[in-house]
Image (cartoon, rainbow, N blue to C red):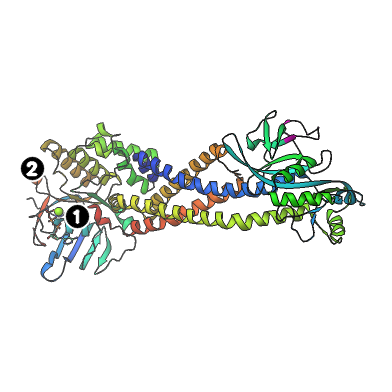
Amino acid sequence: MIAMPDQPSRKPLVELRNLSKHFGEGQARVDALRDVTLTICSREVVGLLGPSGSGKSTLLNAIGCILEPDQGWMRLDGEVVYENRWLRGNLRRLRLEKIGFIFQTHNLLPFLNCTDNVAVVLHLAGWKKSAAIARAHELLADLPVDHRKVAMPGQLSGGEAQRVAIARALANRPRIILADEPTAALDSVRAGIVMDLLHKLAVEQDAAIIAVTHDEKILGRLDRIYRMVDGALSS
Amino acid sequence: MNLAFRDIRHKLGRFVLTSLGLSMLLGVVVTMAGIYRGQTADALALLQATRADVWIVEAGSHGPFAEASRIPGDTREIVARMDGVSEAGSLTLQTVQLVQGDRRLRLQIIGYEPGRPGGPATLIAGREITSNRYEIIVDRQTGLLPGEALKLGRRTFTVVGLTSGIVTLSGDSVVYLTLADAQQVQFDLAPPAARREQARGAARGSTDLVNAVVARVSANIPASLIAAEISRWKHLSALTAAEQETLLTRTVIERASRQIGLFMTVLTLVSAVIIALIVYTLTLDKTRDIATLKMIGAPDRTIIGLIVQQALLMGVSGFIIGTAFVYAFRGVFPRRIEMLPADIAGLFVVVVLVCLAASALGVRVAVKVDPARALAG
Ligand SMILES: Nc1ncnc2c1ncn2[C@@H]1O[C@H](COP(=O)(O)OP(=O)(O)OP(=O)(O)O)[C@@H](O)[C@H]1O
Ligand SMILES: [Mg+2]
């Protein structure tokens, strides 16, 4: 657990104030987020730890704007996107431009090969086809899964699929990268490669990276670690 | 990068099977339209083959194809002598049913006077009737060939010529005999009682009845003028070819368009429902992919495009396959199928509209998919 001192050039990319979210009512009520307040700056790789059901995924989904919180305040890359309600109309555009997701489940599109699964994000962002393919190949080579460029997702191993999903999350150079167990399916060598890459990215792209993990082998490579228990955050 | 196309390519087998299934359905719709046009064409075939300007029938009758008509045999001479009439010919019309080999034939027998209007306009084989007796010209739809024999009543006729596509309103083949032969066949085939009566009448010298007289008018005289003049004679009615055509088409349209129109509407609706269900299930199958697309930032436009394009590709390829199939096999269909480019184009537009409408259900589901579904394990 290394608490990095804030440097002046660092910009806060993710800022949450008293963000709350519950599921269900009465007996079935689960408080998945309780007054979560946190700030994550550019060039930071932050770890999120906690027991199963503590609200880690819920937090990532809220930051990723795919889950609406109950109340609170949230600013992403300088733009207040939530204040007790969504303030921004086109959340999908926001995700396309600023957020990259890496999931527990890989969510590759089964009808596109690996290269196109990465390139599709760039296609949506309006890139030219050749540039998109070139960027996809470059990312696949970094991870490295370029030997599976033309394979369909159904033919990949769990680790390969996860690395393709990581390549897709990074394709459009998002400022905020949300990763749910990014190294769960990887051996320590490849987990190391992925973490190195995330670090490199955080620095090169001035990005903030939030990674949920149980993975002991990567704890040492995180800049900062938050712990979640029953929806509440402690650092 | 076209996602619709990629998804189809990924599950090509399913797409091809679905399109083939749809093509059968849409092929039937195309066939219906073809039958309808075919019936209209059939109804006019005999009329057009006769190339008469005026049809003269019994007073009050709507023409020899619609109602029974009997007029005296000398009508032709009277008509032919009129100013403005260049030629005229007597006709008898009679429907017979007979068994030829192992086939049941329904024939429309036309008795005409060779050399006068009323005979077949063009032959595709053989020759005109030259001898007065026992020669017959048949339509090739009967399956008979020149030189073959056909028994009508008590006489055997020899096929001397072939026509093509001359049929009646109900699709029966037309055959041509001389007027005298036709009258004889009419007598032979009449029920015994009527025959006895007719034979008694023959003693009084009035067997010489025909069903219609057709006339051609001189080039510079309007047919309607001649028709109006003849209609003034109280025992006769006269219709111009145009009037006859309107009458026949109206008959067909009244009868066929209601049945076929109903069928086509029902089938089109069924196709719409089926396409809607297919699109709906395809969308449900893709819920997770749609959620993923939304999560990585795809706008609704992309997702709706994916669904609508697939629906269109399916419907359009089904329509093209179905139409090609009907076109290829229209010859072996028992009824005439007339495929007009305008009809095909019209149906194509309908199919496109049906696909668009049918996608609505799938689109509704897709738009509502929660991007968070992508995360659910
Ligand atoms: N859509 C939902 N509806 C109802 N309850 C939910 C929903 N999503 C999450 N929860 C509940 O909220 C709590 C937090 O869930 P969350 O998925 O954030 O946990 P987690 O920390 O990611 O767990 P894990 O380590 O197992 O992935 C859990 O009790 C879970 O059952
Ligand atoms: Mg989780």
Across and down, in percent, residue A101 comes to: 23, 50
Q: Which residue is mark 2?
A: A217
In the image, the segment drawn in magenta is B119-136
Q: Nearer the viewer, residue B180 or A78?
A: B180
Estimate the spatial distance between the alpha carbons at disc 2 and disc 1, rounded to whole Å: 24 Å
The reply to whether residue B246 is visible in this rendering is yes
The reply to whether residue B53 is visible in this rendering is no
Q: Quadrant of the N terminus of chain B?
A: top left
Residue at 43 percent across and 42 percent down: it is B20
Q: Is residue A48 left or right of residue A112?
A: left
Across and down, in percent, residue B23 comes to: 46, 44
Q: Is residue B323 above or below residue B149?
A: below
Chain letter for the residue marked with disc 1 in the picture:
A
Q: Secondary structure at mark 1?
A: strand
Within 10 Å of disc 2 (Cα), the crowding (few <14, some 14-19, many 20+) is some
Do labels 2 and 1 touch, CB within 8 Å? no
Q: Main secondary structure of the magenta part?
A: loop
**Can you name the residue that lies furthest to the top here?**
B147
Asked if the magenta segment contains residue B227, the reply would be no
Q: Which residue is mark 1?
A: A41
Across and down, in percent, residue B178 comes to: 78, 39
Q: Is residue B222 left or right of residue A94?
A: right
Q: Secondary structure at mark 2?
A: helix
